[in-house]
Image (spheres, rainbow, N blue to C red):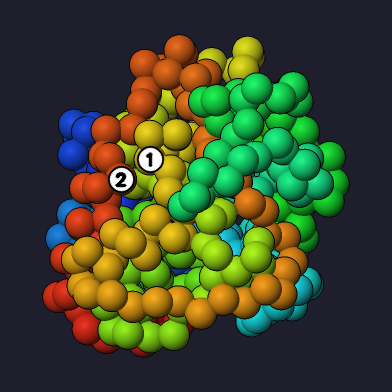
Amino acid sequence: MKLLITGICGFAGSALAEALVERIEGLEIHGVDNLMRPGSETNRARLRKLGVVLAHGDIRCASDWEALPDADWLIDAAANPSVLAGVAGGGTSRQLIEHNLGSLFHALEYAKRCRAGVVLLSSSRVYSIPALAWLPLRDTGGRFELETASPLPRGVSPAGVSEDFSTEPPVSLYGSTKRAAEILALEYGEAFGFPVWVDRCGVMAGAGQFGTPDQGIFSFWVNAHLRRRPLRYIGFDGKGKQVRDAFHPRDLGALVDRQMRVPRTSGRRIYTAGGGAANSMSLRELTEWCDARFGRHEPASDLRPRPYDIPWIVMDNSAAAAEFHWTPQIGIEQLLCEIAAHAEAHPDWLERSGA
């Protein structure tokens, strides 16, 4: 089988390539990346050792697709992954649309031409921000927890947020590009008869992730705590009780492998994929973990809310478990130990990441 991965030098793309080479015998991987993300250059040597054929190209440009070979499957792992993209920090709203939608259009035209199946890496941030903010929560001391004694809206349960949860705007500019990408990919697959899988990924984390506050929070927090860099609990009373779940892209690789072995073009196409309740953690709990490993370092409190922040989101993997017999295998403790060991071995990692 021949596979093309866009954004292959990013954390998700490179980790997926590594996981799939181990899982699929005889797999031939081609990858394309524009290398604009700080740190992405560091993954090229590792990918070449795996036998990956790398192309330096900008997939926003139609002509850069002309030199890419036909593939059986395309994994779209190229995007601006920050929920603040187009609003705060680097990049404009125009660039966000070009990165997350313009490039996808070219990818889907490529899939149409060579009859390739498509796996689109989407995001948990396609879900409605007001609906998430209105979830009934209780303060358990170190974290927010879902209040299951209260009536819960459709698509949320003690297992987390499922594919059926509201995607009603606002979802952020970033979230809207990912939701639009989902619709466009599914429509292309329906119109031109190729299989499309959409995986709404929660927070991915692991060793080698580029650590910035808005794109790799677990990696950033561990690296910054170790180096005694300033850390802040932003919003929600400044106590760090907001909760996310984390999972490793190697676990995502297991799901993608199983999806590519079932190239159907009907039935459920969208799945949530994340660490789940067992792999969830608040920022305060993450700080306590880091305190135990590296020594005490107390974050500052910042009471000002930040655009698009939400107090609690955990992915419900029930649909993927039922259909693909998939659950994450790398637990939160193993994941954090992996990040910590990498941080200890790479003292310049935050600088490499552009943090």
Residue drawn at point x = 19 percent, y = 66 percent: 293
Rendered location of residue 79, percent (x, y) = 57, 60
320 in relation to 241, above or below: above
Of the numbered discs in the image, which one, if any, rests on residue 44? none
Mark 2 neighbour class, 10 Å CA radius: few under 14, some 14 to 19, many 20 or more: many
Residue drawn at point x = 71 percent, y = 25 percent: 150
Residue drawn at point x = 49 percent, y = 20 percent: 318
Residue 139 visible in the shown view = yes
Tell whether label 1 touches label 2 (CB within 8 Å): yes
The amino acid sitting under disc 1 is Asn
The amino acid sitting under disc 2 is Ile
Disc 2 target residue: 332
Rendered location of residue 48, percent (x, y) = 21, 63
Q: Quadrant of residue 167?
A: top right
Using the image as rendered, state which of residue 4 and residue 278 is in the foreground: 278
Could you tell which of marks 2 and 1 lies nearer the N-terminus?
A: 1
Residue 69 visible in the shown view = no
112 in relation to 341, above or below: above
Using the image as rendered, state which of residue 330 and residue 117 is in the foreground: 330
Rendered location of residue 350, percent (x, y) = 36, 81
Q: CA distance from mark 2 to mark 1?
A: 5 Å
Looking at the rendered structure, the secondary structure element under dot 2 is: helix
Left or right: where 144 falls relative to 41: right
Of the numbered discs in the image, which one, if any, rests on residue 279? 1
Using the image as rendered, state which of residue 222 and residue 353 is in the foreground: 222
Left or right: where 86 falls relative to 78: right
The quarter in which the C terminus is drawn is: bottom left
Q: Quadrant of residue 327?
A: top left
Residue drawn at point x = 71 percent, y = 52 percent: 175
Looking at the rendered structure, the secondary structure element under dot 1 is: helix
The quarter in which the N terminus is drawn is: top left
Rendered location of residue 310, percent (x, y) = 67, 53
